[in-house]
């Protein structure tokens, strides 16, 4: 079968064939994890952006696969809408959707453009809605309809929202993910790296320089250990490639160019012998104290009546835990396998009004664990782990 060579302008099915809805749950959260890159580990991988749209021609078999409805069909009551989905490397895909399109349909279409072959870790992806002016973040439920999503978040103009395809459910064993699904692993790697580069607060300078040198080595995998000592080579790195691809902006602005150059030159030799794969895993290990990529946290309260303000931590490694002190170790509540049921209710309180409540029924627990979140959005994001 001849596949679309671009796929950036491919539409998702307006009336998709019923498929098994794979919930992003325990199995996905406990499997292994992966990241995306894009320079030399590219076998079976393709990243598409808007520039590809003019070249896209679907074969008849691809059209049959997606089963598009004719524009005159009475079931297509809405005009097809175009959506821009941002990828972890900053590129974006254009997706058309219709009345029956779900969030999962969008995820499936975009992730299939990353690689033409099925992958073991496709279910770790989700779509995050980001509103930069207000710093609002919302995870979209995979079964929600796209028109439902647009209506729900219409309190801001649609062009102010960013629909981001992200690896959300991070497995324990990243090396297992790399071995079985390099495309997803490399996507995740790009996601973590770019989250780190967007940090606006001050970070440890030595750590930043080490991470910079590791990423330079990965990016230029054939560079010798003395290559950056040559002035012309460093000027190429600085001016043509850009240090912003290796360092957060506060590190660049807080150091003089000559001092920054000297630090990078001195430290690069320590990492010059690393392989490309070693660079990625070392980067992920060293960046973890700054970017907690394997967990999500939610501010909430535990208990009924008298409740305790905590920070709920959800991860494949810790399961469901909570923190009362950011410097203390998390207190374990339950593993994903022990969660039997999740209910959501809205409670009324004379002093504070209505509050969303998430009730977890945990196997072996004498009582139901209740998490009172500050917003319905936090509650919905928590439910997506079930």
Image: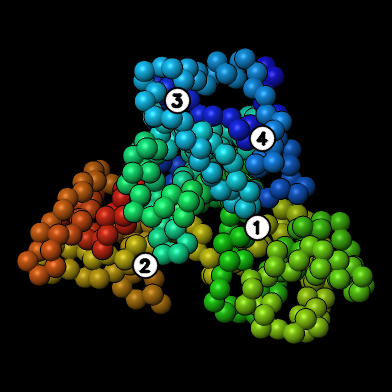
> Disc 3 vs disc 1: Cβ atoms closer than 8 Å?
no
At mark 2, the secondary structure is: loop
Q: Decide which of 147, 64 is in the foreground and name it.
A: 147
Q: Earlier in the sequence, mark 3 or mark 2?
A: 3
Callout 3 crowding tier (Cα within 10 Å): few <14, some 14–19, many ≥20: many
On screen, residue 202 versus residue 386, left or right, reads right
**CA distance separating discs 3 and 1:** 40 Å
In primary-sequence order, the first of circles 2 and 4 is 4
- At horizontal 32% and vertical 57% (from top left) the residue drawn is 378
For marks 3 and 4, the one nearer the N-term is 3
Q: Secondary structure at mark 3?
A: loop
Looking at the image, which residue is at 38% across and 43% down? 150
Q: Is residue 97 left or right of residue 1?
A: left
Which residue lies under the disc numbered 4?
53
Q: Position of residue 41 (x, y in %)?
A: 74, 45
In the rendered view, would you say 3 is above or below 39?
above
Q: CA distance from mark 2 to mark 1?
A: 25 Å
Residue beneath disc 3: 14
Q: Are marks 4 and 1 in contact (CB under 8 Å)?
A: no
Rate crowding at label 1 as few (under 14), some (14 to 19) or many (20 or more) other CA atoms within 10 Å.
some
Gap in angstroms between the C-alphas marked 3 and 2: 45 Å
Q: Residue at x 53, y 44 (%)?
A: 85
Identify the residue under disc 1. 281
Q: CA distance from mark 3 to mark 4?
A: 20 Å
């Amino acid at each position: 079968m001849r596949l679309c060579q671009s796929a950036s302008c491919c539409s998702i099915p307006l009336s998709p064939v019923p498929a098994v809805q794979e919930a992003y749950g325990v199995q996905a959260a406990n499997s292994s994890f992966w990241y995306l890159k894009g320079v030399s580990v590219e076998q079976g991988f393709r990243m598409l952006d808007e520039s590809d749209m003019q070249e896209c021609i679907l074969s008849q078999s691809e059209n049959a696969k997606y089963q598009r409805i004719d524009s005159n069909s009475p079931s297509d009551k809405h005009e097809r809408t175009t959506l821009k989905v941002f990828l972890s490397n900053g590129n974006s895909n254009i997706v058309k959707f219709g009345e029956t399109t779900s969030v999962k349909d969008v995820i499936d279409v975009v992730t299939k453009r990353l690689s033409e072959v099925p992958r073991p870790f496709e279910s770790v992806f989700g779509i995050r809605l980001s509103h930069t002016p207000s710093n609002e973040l919302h995870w979209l439920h995979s079964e929600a309809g796209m028109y439902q999503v647009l209506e729900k978040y219409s309190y801001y103009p649609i062009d102010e929202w960013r629909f981001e395809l992200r690896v959300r459910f991070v497995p324990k064993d990243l090396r297992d993910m790399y071995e079985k699904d390099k495309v997803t692993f490399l996507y995740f790697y790009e996601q973590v790296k770019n989250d780190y580069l967007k940090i606006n607060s001050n970070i440890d300078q030595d750590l930043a320089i080490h991470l910079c040198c590791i990423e330079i080595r990965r990016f230029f995998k054939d560079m010798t250990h003395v290559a950056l000592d040559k002035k012309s080579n460093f000027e190429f790195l600085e001016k043509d490639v850009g240090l912003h691809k290796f360092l957060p902006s506060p590190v660049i602005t807080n150091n003089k160019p000559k001092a920054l150059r000297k630090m990078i030159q001195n430290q690069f030799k320590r990492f010059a012998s690393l392989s490309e794969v070693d660079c990625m895993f070392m980067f992920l290990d060293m960046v973890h104290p700054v970017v907690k990529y394997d967990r999500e946290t939610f501010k909430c309260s535990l208990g009924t009546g008298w409740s305790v303000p905590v920070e709920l931590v959800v991860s494949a490694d810790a399961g469901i835990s909570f923190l009362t002190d950011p410097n203390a170790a998390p207190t374990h509540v339950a593993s994903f396998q022990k969660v039997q049921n999740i209910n959501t209710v809205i409670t009324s309180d004379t002093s504070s009004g209505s509050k969303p409540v998430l009730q977890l029924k945990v196997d072996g627990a004498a009582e139901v664990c209740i998490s009172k979140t500050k917003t319905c959005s936090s509650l919905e994001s928590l439910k997506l782990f079930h």
